Image: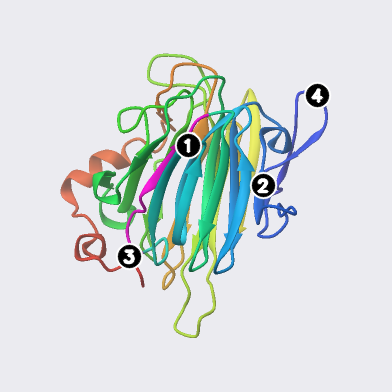
């Protein structure tokens, strides 16, 4: 199954980007709306050596800055916050900063680190804000082999923004998440139109080698799209439309992904399950949440 699709203007739009292919002079990864072939969602990642800093400008976007690894000092105009960060994405949520449009930004990291800038096109945004990791909304979703931990950094009911929605998911090894497959590409009851980015990290095995995972994306009869991708550490998959899921974690390798979403309508995450798989939700009533999420395993292993 391929990793390209035809855009309405006839040009190719890539769906799966391997780690390193979106690197620029400033960013380890830069996926702008123009590069993605859509209008709203973006993602940038900056790698900083110990003592290094990056001078940036949000431009016509609002950004959420969070740690993938390491701590940083974040300056936004006259505002400043210490991002305490985390050891890695499997060791619990990060604290974060919200940065409004048209803001000069400096991210400095005394100890070095890797930082995600989740973005959305915006013309007004909201005020600069900092949130402690302890205040971030965390939920355990699904059950059995569909158990996963969802960290709702900036969803419609957890943090205000103009368009940006952002969460992250940790899926313990051997489990499936983003399941049942769901879509959000129509304006209708129970569904909103959102462009979505998946950024993946995969845990290492005892030898230090990173594993892989798999991501599925498929369309409807009137809007075809088709992807089954083996994704590695640092890969990106873009979801312009269609059903996405499952995200499959290999046995022995915990899976992390950061989701960035934005769209033209009301700022809310509403999605429709593929009717063929909706019944799976009912089966969770007789299953337990994966104990590795409750006990903390799968958060650093």
Q: Which of marks 3 and 4 is nearer the N terminus?
A: 4
Q: Which residue is drawn at 51% across and 22% down?
A: 193
| Above or below 224: residue 203 | below
Give the CA distance from mark 2 to mark 4.
Answer: 23 Å
Residue 63, image x, y percentages: 52, 37
Q: State the image quarter where residue 175 is shown.
A: bottom left
Q: How crowded is mark 1: few (under 14 residues within 10 Å), some or many (20 or more)?
A: few
Could you say which disc has been placed on residue 30 in the image?
2
- SS class, disc 3: loop
| Above or below 282: residue 115 | below
Give the CA distance from mark 3 to mark 1.
Answer: 35 Å
User: In this figure, which residue is indicated by the disc labeled 1?
Assistant: 78
Q: Are marks 2 and 4 in contact (CB under 8 Å)?
A: no
Q: Which of marks 2 and 1 is nearer the N terminus?
A: 2
Task: Find the magenta span and give its range.
Answer: 91-100
Q: Which of marks 2 and 4 is in front?
A: 2
Describe residue 300's horizontal placement relative to residue 9 as left or right. Answer: left
Q: From this viewpoint, is residue 245 visible? A: no
Residue 85, image x, y percentages: 39, 58
- SS class, disc 2: strand
| Above or below 84: residue 281 | above
Q: Which of marks 3 and 2 is nearer the N terminus?
A: 2
Q: Which of marks 3 and 4 is in front?
A: 3
- SS class, disc 1: loop
User: In this figure, which residue is indicated by the disc labeled 3?
Assistant: 299
Q: State the image quarter where residue 299 is shown.
A: bottom left
Q: Which of marks 3 and 2 is in front?
A: 2
Q: Residues within 10 Å of mark 4 (few under 14, many from 20)?
A: few
């Amino acid at each position: 199954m391929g990793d390209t699709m035809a855009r309405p203007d006839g040009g190719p739009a890539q769906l799966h980007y391997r780690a390193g292919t979106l690197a620029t002079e400033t960013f380890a990864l830069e996926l702008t709306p123009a590069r993605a072939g859509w209008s709203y969602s973006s993602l940038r990642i900056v790698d900083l050596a110990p003592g290094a800093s990056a001078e940036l400008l949000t431009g016509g976007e609002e950004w959420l800055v969070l740690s993938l690894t390491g701590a940083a000092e974040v300056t936004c105009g006259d505002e400043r916050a210490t991002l305490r960060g985390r050891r890695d994405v499997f060791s619990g949520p990060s604290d974060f900063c919200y940065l409004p449009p048209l803001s000069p930004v400096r991210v400095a990291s005394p100890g070095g680190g890797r930082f995600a800038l989740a973005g959305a096109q915006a013309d007004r945004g909201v005020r600069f804000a900092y949130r402690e990791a302890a205040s971030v909304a965390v939920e355990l979703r699904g059950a059995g082999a569909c158990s996963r931990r969802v960290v709702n950094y900036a969803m419609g009911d957890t943090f205000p923004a103009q368009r940006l929605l952002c969460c992250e998911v940790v899926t313990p090894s051997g489990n499936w998440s983003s399941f049942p497959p769901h879509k959000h590409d129509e304006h209708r009851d129970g569904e909103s139109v959102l462009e979505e980015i998946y950024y993946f990290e995969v845990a290492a095995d005892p030898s230090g080698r990173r594993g892989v995972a798999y991501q599925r994306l498929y369309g409807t009869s009137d809007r075809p799209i088709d992807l089954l991708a083996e994704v590695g550490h640092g890969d990106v998959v873009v979801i312009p439309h269609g059903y996405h899921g499952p995200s499959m974690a290999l046995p022995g390798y915990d899976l992390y992904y950061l989701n960035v979403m934005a769209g033209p309508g009301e700022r809310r995450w509403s999605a429709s399950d593929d009717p063929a798989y909706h019944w799976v939700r009912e089966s969770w009533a007789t299953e337990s949440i994966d104990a590795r999420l409750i006990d903390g395993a799968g958060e650093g292993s």
